Amino acid sequence: MIRGMPPLKCLQTFSAVMETGSFAKAAEQLNVTPSAISHQIRMLEDILGKPLFARRNRTVLPTEDAIAYANALGESFTRIAVATSRFASEGSVQRLMLHSAPSLATLWLVPRLGSFRARHPEIDLTLFAGHEPAKLGDDGVMIDIQYNRPVPEACEGLVLCEETIMPLASPAFVARHRLERVEDIGTVPLIHSVRSVVQWDQWVARHAPHVMLARGGMTFDRAYLGLMAARDGLGLMLESSLQAGGMLAAGELVAPFGPLGVTAVAHRVVFRREDRARPQIEAFLAWITDEMATDRARIDGAQRVSRAAP
């Protein structure tokens, strides 16, 4: 028994007397004798150190202390009933606690969670986002979508896709600066992402080694902040088609030099090897693999149309 808590039978008896207004009716409700009711009430009064009922002939009247005690117990009983009902009704609900790199969560994952919910309504998903990797297994976190980090020894990592990191800008920015050739990047403001797996000097060394980059520009520590700045026409940004896919599809950003970029493996879905067979993890891995395949088919189709255009 919990320390300081009266026996549940005493509390149940007290609640029945308060509800029915008499020991006899409480006995009928609980299917016990009236003497048993009297015994439980006396025991509760001894524990509390004060009377709960004034006995007059065959009736009992609750004291002010009894009324206050009954109100407090009523709240507790309601909470117990709600918790019991919720626990019983959620027996088939599975829970998945997920952590993700913040930019992918904002730009790619959250816009697609409706698809996951429609496919797996039995899974309640909780999402956290942050640059630092999650400690899998701690606080229930089962999956971490990490950006440009090694896979821990006790874990498995599923590569989301090969990402093409390429220059992106708003259509208005491209028109205003007349961006047509890679040499033109030396004359425009650039947007830098300090965490990007590919930096501007690496891209230039591969595709335009003779170009001197403009000094200055803007720097962000999150890809989605830099992409929002590029969308608003503040500069030319180097980012992947995976994270910028939504803005590219909406026409908010364009690739002025086409898919001229650097291919990299940056995002991985990481989970503990011992948890691989959990149904929530299997469901999420199957879903995100299908979503990536759909994205890949959409990008390939768009590139085929572009190459076929006169």
Image: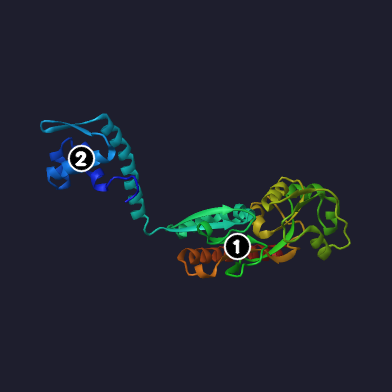
Q: Which numbered tag is attached to residue 169?
A: none
| Residue 72 appears left or right of 268 | left
Check the image and name the residue furthest to the left: 57
| Residue 236 appears left or right of 107 | right
**Residue at image location 62% in from the left, 67% down from the top:** 152
Q: Is residue 193 shown above or below 17?
A: below
The residue labelled by disc 2 is 42
Q: Which numbered tag is attached to residue 295?
A: 1
Q: Out of 93 and 237, give the one closest to the viewer.
A: 93
Q: Out of 203 and 25, give the one closest to the viewer.
A: 25
> Which callout, 1 or 2, points to the residue nearer the camera?
2
In the rendered image, the quadrant that contains the C terminus is: bottom right
Q: Out of 117 and 250, give the one closest to the viewer.
A: 117
Q: Out of 105 and 230, give the one closest to the viewer.
A: 105
Image coordinates of residue 100 in percent, x first then y, are 59, 57
Graded by Cα atoms within 10 Å as few (under 14), some (14 to 19) or many (20 or more), the crowding at tag 1 reads some
Q: Secondary structure at mark 1?
A: helix
Tell me the kind of residue under disc 2: Arg
**Residue at image location 85% in from the left, 50% down from the top:** 215
Image coordinates of residue 220 in percent, x first then y, are 73, 49
Q: Secondary structure at mark 2?
A: helix
**Residue at image location 45% in from the left, 66% down from the top:** 279
Q: Is residue 103 shown above or below 64?
A: below
Image coordinates of residue 40 in percent, x first then y, are 20, 43
Tell me the kind of residue under disc 1: Asp
Graded by Cα atoms within 10 Å as few (under 14), some (14 to 19) or many (20 or more), the crowding at tag 2 reads some
Q: Is residue 159 shown above or below 86?
A: below
| Residue 284 appears left or right of 89 | right
* Sequence-first disc among 1 and 2: 2
Name the image quarter holding residue 197: bottom right
Image coordinates of residue 262 in percent, x first then y, are 75, 65
Name the image quarter holding residue 260: bottom right
